[in-house]
Image (cartoon, rainbow, N blue to C red):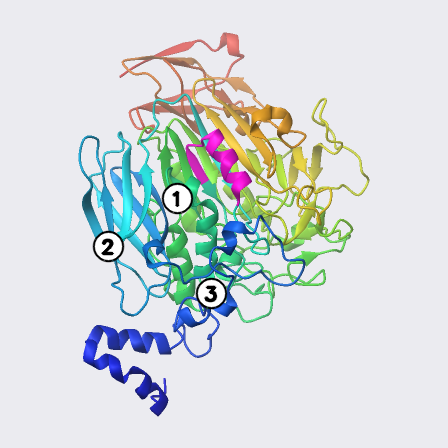
């Protein structure tokens, strides 16, 4: 920065007030990400209080009633210059293994305000007491609290405070381990062209009372103004976020991209970013990730990727449901320069004669070795009270879409989805299948339930892609070219095009349900909404629900999108053809142990599951010998080798004593 006379006159008075204010004055004068990026965070840095004309008037978001901008970029965000007793915008948390991690987002602070936030709790029968304080970070204006030794068996009110009067209150819920059914809300794609509250969604969610909130990406589309967009998101959803564990992961638009191939932290150099890597400075990427995801449980593999970009993939258990939280953009290879261009841009294919195998090349990555290793280890570990498993990520492991952008804009294959590269997709699905886990995601703006195929139709896990919360950015449709159902359609479905299909990347998928927009220009008909997933631990069934944005949940299932709800059995997430059964295991001295089955000829782990009760008969998919391992939380206590499959009623039994 050049120290001009004008700048000296501007900062000179603060020298009388102390060194802290000097640094703040310089911070106000210098773009936080350098002179090359003056528009990054421009509404929340510098003399932000003088930039009100660039934003909506105070409280406009409270009264806008979902007003959408017809075209172009986002509508103006809410004013950042709020009354000083309202500067704590919202807070969000998770708890895991006795560690509470809670983040708070503040509105921008003024130079004379302290940059410290305080966390207070009120245990039952006690007064409010401060348990932590932390710095309010700049740029970003976020604050983060880590409390060890947290007792997750009790619900505790909390409040985040700043100064004398500003505070945000909520409730840290006890871990609902006793609940028979755990409910997860699946949400993504919150258009910034439609400002104002999300009252209809929040009111429905409060009535349905999910145990976990999952925001799978594109919480804001403000690209270069993440803090303003994140604050806007917080205003819209804070009344549901404040009192339950929330998983929030950034996707491409959150970090300022239309699409993102992270290339393990590389630097993108071309328009559209299909060469792989990130467009904006590392500090901005890390800030976005910190604001949205710092509160997640600690990652088991915290080493940053290239250029020191942080990672957040991790696991979290709530009520006995063990979630693997993935970063399916960060390690993915960019297509530009790696495969021949066969469409209008490097990531779109419209050549019907192309061979999908020709773009599945050696060296291409999807999740990358680190996350594949994480999934492999997670699928075998049921510690921490895990009973059932589930995988969360940003986008789908297939291209379950035909029309992109408009009802007449057909696209054969989109390399932005996790259907490419196919080998990486299949490796990921095999690990997910080993845990009998469904996959939840967003990003596609089109709600679907599919059953993935790996080697053949139906042999993989189920996937549920949520609809866009507010779908004014980019419509998508499921619409087969021949307008015919595939083989094995869903019986009695109200939807005409269910059944077995191959996506444009050659991946086998079975379509169970989809929610096409009727009219993308009409907010009542553009298929906005959210997903709800019910994990029934007793029946071992999983139900996918899909609710339109303006539905009345009091009307019951008839208010859902046609084709929903969809209920599956837990073990249906492994759809391989059964070739035989091993001896029934009868356990003594333990209930609900963990059982792992290994095919000896290949050394492949077929599955690792926590069983119910004291009896379990393993199924297998080949006629050779198998090994069965058992344990309380991991398959590490006993091993039985050389077991050969038989018909179920002829396989016999084995006593297993603990």
Residue at the (35%, 30%) spot, across then down: 382
Q: Residues within 10 Å of mark 1 (few under 14, many from 20)?
A: some
Between discs 3 and 1, the one toward the N terminus = 3
Residue at the (30%, 70%) spot, across then down: 111
Q: Is residue 271 magenta?
A: no
Can residue 429 be seen in the rendering of this structure? no
Q: Which residue is mark 3?
A: 266
In this rendered view, identify the residue nearer to me: 121 or 497.
121
Q: Which residue is mark 2?
A: 164
Between the C-alphas of marks 3 and 2, the distance is: 44 Å
Q: Nearer the viewer, mark 3 or mark 2?
A: 2
Q: Main secondary structure of the magenta part?
A: helix
Between the C-alphas of marks 3 and 1, the distance is: 22 Å
Q: Residues within 10 Å of mark 2 (few under 14, many from 20)?
A: few
Is residue 508 shown left or right of residue 610? right
The x, y position of residue 283, in whole percent, is 39, 66
Between discs 3 and 2, the one toward the N terminus = 2
Disc 3 element: loop
Between the C-alphas of marks 2 and 1, the distance is: 44 Å
Tag shown at residue 374: 1
The magenta stretch spans which residues? 198-213
Residue 567: which quarter of the image? top right
Is residue 2 shown left or right of residue 197? left
Disc 1 element: helix
The x, y position of residue 468, in whole percent, is 59, 45
Residue at the (49%, 35%) spot, across then down: 205
Asked if the residue under mark 1 is in contact with the one under mark 3, i.e. CB atoms within 8 Å, the reply is: no
The x, y position of residue 539, in whole percent, is 47, 17
């Amino acid at each position: 920065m050049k120290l001009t006379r004008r700048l000296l006159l501007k900062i000179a008075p603060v020298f009388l007030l102390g060194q802290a204010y000097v640094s703040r004055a310089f911070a106000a004068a210098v773009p936080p990400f350098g002179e090359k990026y003056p528009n990054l965070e421009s509404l929340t840095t510098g003399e932000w209080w003088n930039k009100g004309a660039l934003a909506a008037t105070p409280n406009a978001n409270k009264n806008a009633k979902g007003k959408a901008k017809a075209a172009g970029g986002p509508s103006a965000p809410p004013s950042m210059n709020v009354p000083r007793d309202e500067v704590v915008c919202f807070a969000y948390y998770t708890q895991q293994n006795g560690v509470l991690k809670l983040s708070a987002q503040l509105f921008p602070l003024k130079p004379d305000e302290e940059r410290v936030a305080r966390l207070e709790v009120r245990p039952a029968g006690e007064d409010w007491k401060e348990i932590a304080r932390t710095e309010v970070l700049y740029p970003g204006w976020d604050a983060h609290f880590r409390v060890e030794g947290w007792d997750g068996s009790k619900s505790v009110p909390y409040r985040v405070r700043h100064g004398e009067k500003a505070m945000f209150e909520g409730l840290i819920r006890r871990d609902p381990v006793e609940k028979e059914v755990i409910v997860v809300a699946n949400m993504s794609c919150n258009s910034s062209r439609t400002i104002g509250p999300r009252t209809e969604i929040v009111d429905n969610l409060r009535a349905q009372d999910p145990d976990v909130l999952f925001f799978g990406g594109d919480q804001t589309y403000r690209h270069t103004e993440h803090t303003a967009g994140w604050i806007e998101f917080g205003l819209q959803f804070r009344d549901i976020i404040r009192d339950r564990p929330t998983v929030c992961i950034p996707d491409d638009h959150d970090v300022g991209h239309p699409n993102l191939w992270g290339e393990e932290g590389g630097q993108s150099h071309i328009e559209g970013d299909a060469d792989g890597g990130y467009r904006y400075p590392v500090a901005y990427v890390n800030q976005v990730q910190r604001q949205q995801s710092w509160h997640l449980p600690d990652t088991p593999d915290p080493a940053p990727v290239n250029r020191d970009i942080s990672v957040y993939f991790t696991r979290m258990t709530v009520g006995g449901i063990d979630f693997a939280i993935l970063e399916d953009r960060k390690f993915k290879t960019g297509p530009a320069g790696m495969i021949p261009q066969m469409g209008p841009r490097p990531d779109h294919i419209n050549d019907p004669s192309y061979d999908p195998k020709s773009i599945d090349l050696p060296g291409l990555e999807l999740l990358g070795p680190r996350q594949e290793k994480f999934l492999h280890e997670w699928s075998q570990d049921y510690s921490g009270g895990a009973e059932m498993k589930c995988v969360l990520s940003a986008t789908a492991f297939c291209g379950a879409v035909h029309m992109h952008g408009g009802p007449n804009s057909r696209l054969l294959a989109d390399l932005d989805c996790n259907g490419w590269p196919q080998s990486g997709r299949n490796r990921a699905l095999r690990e997910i299948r080993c845990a009998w886990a469904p996959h939840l995601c967003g990003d596609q703006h089109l709600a679907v339930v599919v059953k993935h195929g790996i080697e053949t139709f139906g042999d993989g896990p189920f996937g549920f892609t949520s609809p866009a919360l507010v779908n004014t950015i980019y419509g998508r449709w499921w619409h087969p070219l021949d307008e015919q159902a595939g083989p094995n359609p869903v019986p009695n479905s109200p939807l005409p095009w269910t059944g077995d299909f191959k996506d444009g990347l050659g991946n086998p998928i079975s379509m169970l349900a989809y929610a096409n927009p009727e009219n993308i220009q009409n907010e009542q008909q553009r298929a906005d909404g959210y997903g709800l997933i019910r994990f029934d631990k007793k029946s071992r069934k999983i139900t996918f629900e899909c609710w339109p944005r303006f539905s009345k949940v009091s009307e019951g299932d008839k208010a859902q999108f046609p084709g929903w709800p969809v209920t599956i059995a837990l073990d249906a997430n492994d759809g391989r053809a059964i070739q035989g059964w091993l001896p029934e295991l009868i356990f003594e001295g333990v209930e609900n142990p963990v059982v792992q089955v290994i095919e000896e000829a290949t050394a492949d782990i077929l599955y690792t599951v926590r069983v119910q009760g004291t009896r379990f008969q393993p199924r297998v998919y080949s006629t050779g010998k198998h090994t069965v391992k058992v344990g309380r939380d991991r398959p590490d206590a006993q091993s039985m080798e050389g077991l050969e499959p038989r018909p179920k009623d002829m396989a016999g039994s084995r006593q297993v004593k603990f």
